[in-house]
């Protein structure tokens, strides 16, 4: 059962799970409800079938959020795939009159930037090279065939969610400002301002030092950013 605190809903990156944001928890104040979510097929939901469809993934996240909502101000935040899905989740929450007071996205340059490659459909060796290029996967996983056999299907399913069908997103958020942060060494970091095209309210974009998984090197700073986003509306009200 949810508390009566402002809420932070966190959407994981490809291959992630409910534990992926544990590194932030020590830096978040106790007066915020920390709610990491996860898609089926991993973590606490390992026994469920993986999703390979964007709409199904968005609906799953919205269902989880609606189940936990307590009427307090809240933020939706996501890294990489989590940011991509977070935008769609925020649109849907707007539609049902329960919009977050901010969408915070990291490691993602936003909708309508077409990727020619499809990692989910790559041959194994090419897939592994792409995985190493992205970073973020522990060496003990990359070097362990048994762990890889469990992890790769999850990653392929997640990549399929975001890569299988490219659809231009013409809708904008009407009630939700966007804050985007990317690593200076990330692919498409120079396109971060693309997020400005997807909200009618304010946009803030920042580049912090690091690669795609720069978030792990800026835990305290990210926690502060999320805390400010959540409590801003609470203070006004």
Image (cartoon, helix red, strand yellow):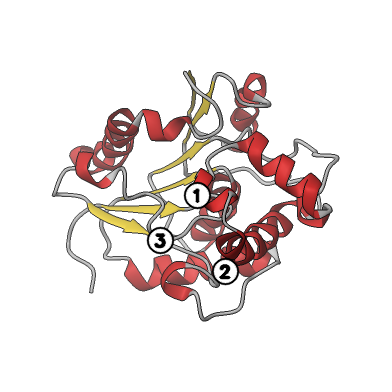
Callout 2 environment at 10 Å: few (<14), some (14 to 19), or many (20+)? Answer: some
199 vs 9, left or right, is right
**Most foreground residue, 47 or 193:** 47
| Marker disc for residue 196 | none
Most foreground residue, 145 or 81: 145
- Label 3 vs 2, first from the N-terminus: 3
Which of the image's four quarters has the C terminus?
A: top left
Would residue 33 appear left or right of 130 to someone viewing this image? left
Which mark, residue 59?
2
Q: How many marks?
A: 3
Question: Marks 3/2: CA distance?
Answer: 17 Å
Q: Name the residue under label 3.
A: 18
Q: Is there a contact, CB below 8 Å, between mark 1 and mark 3?
A: no
Q: Name the residue under label 1.
A: 140
Rendered residue at 42%/61% (across/down): 37
Q: In this orientation, which residue lies closer to the viewer: 90 or 221?
A: 221
Mark 3 and 2 residues: CB-CB less than 8 Å, in contact?
no
User: Which residue is situated farthest in the left direction here?
Assistant: 30
Q: Which of marks 3 and 2 is in front?
A: 3
Snapshot quadrant of residue 51:
bottom right
The crowding category of the residue bearing disc 3, from other C-alpha atoms within 10 Å (few below 14, some 14 to 19, many at least 20), is some
Image position of 153 with respect to 128: above or below? below
SS for dot 2 = helix
Tell me if residue 215 can be seen. Answer: yes
Quadrant including the N terminus: bottom left
Separation of marks 2 and 1 at Cα, in angstroms? 33 Å
Expressed as whole percent of the image width and height from the top left, the position of residue 29 reads: 16, 43
Q: What element carries label 3?
A: loop
For marks 2 and 1 on the same chain, the one whose residue lies earlier in the sequence: 2
N-terminal label among 1 and 3? 3
User: Does residue 194 lie above or below 73 as drawn?
Assistant: above
Is 27 placed left or right of 187 in the picture?
Answer: left
């Amino acid at each position: 059962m949810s508390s009566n605190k402002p809420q932070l809903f966190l959407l994981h990156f490809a291959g992630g799970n409910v534990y992926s944001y544990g590194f932030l928890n020590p830096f978040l104040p106790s007066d915020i409800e920390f709610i990491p979510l996860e898609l089926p097929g991993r973590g606490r939901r390992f026994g469920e079938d993986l999703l390979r469809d964007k709409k199904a993934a968005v609906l799953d996240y919205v269902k989880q959020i609606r189940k936990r909502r307590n009427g307090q101000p809240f933020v939706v935040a996501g890294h990489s795939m989590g940011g991509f899905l977070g935008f769609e989740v925020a649109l849907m929450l707007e539609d049902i009159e329960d919009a977050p007071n901010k969408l915070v996205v990291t490691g993602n340059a936003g909708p309508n930037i077409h990727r020619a490659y499809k990692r989910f459909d790559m041959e194994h060796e090419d897939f592994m090279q792409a995985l190493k290029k992205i970073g973020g996967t522990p060496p003990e996983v990359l070097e362990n065939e048994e762990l890889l056999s469990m992890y790769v299907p999850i990653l392929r399913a997640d990549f399929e969610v975001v890569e299988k069908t490219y659809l231009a997103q013409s809708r904008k958020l009407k009630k939700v400002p966007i804050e985007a942060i990317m690593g200076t060494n990330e692919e498409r970091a120079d396109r971060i301002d693309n997020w400005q095209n997807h909200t009618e309210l304010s946009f803030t974009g920042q580049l912090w030092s690091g690669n795609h998984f720069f978030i792990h090197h800026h835990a305290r700073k990210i926690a502060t950013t999320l805390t400010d986003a959540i409590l801003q509306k609470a203070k006004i009200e």
